[in-house]
Amino acid sequence: MTAPGVDGTSSATYTTPPAGERQGEAPGALLTGHAFLVLVGAGFIALVVGGLAYLSTGNTAGAVLTGLIAGGTSAPVLHKLVGP
């Protein structure tokens, strides 16, 4: 990157790019393996419980709410069970 100097000429200034943008360096992972496993497990539990609730009652809104509650409550439990 060049910036004009005091006398009107351009002087080169060098800045280092952020860590994820350096040449030849891959950006960091969006999720860790632990977080991915917990979220997939909680999503699976939510789908199964929500599906079973829909099959037993036929109420779509109640099944969605039941699935969301099941997934939300299973995430902290899976977080402790899976371990880092």
Image (cartoon, helix red, strand yellow):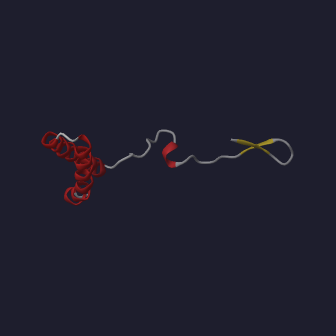
> Observer-nearest residue: 42 or 27?
42
Instruction: List x then y, in percent, for residue 68.
Output: 27, 49
Instruction: List x then y, in percent, for residue 29.
Output: 38, 45
Instruction: List x then y, in percent, for residue 50.
Output: 20, 44
Quadrant location of the C terminus in the rendered image: bottom left
Residue at 14% of width from left, 39% of height from top?
Answer: 55
Q: Quadrant of residue 77?
A: bottom left
Residue at 19% of width from left, 47% of height from top?
Answer: 45
> Observer-nearest residue: 48 or 61?
61
Instruction: List x then y, in percent, for residue 49.
Output: 17, 46
Residue most extreme to the left: 56
The mark tally for this picture is 0
Position of 28 with respect to 59 (left or right) is right
Q: Quadrant of residue 40?
A: top left
> Observer-nearest residue: 27 or 9?
27
Residue at 63% of width from left, 48% of height from top?
Answer: 15
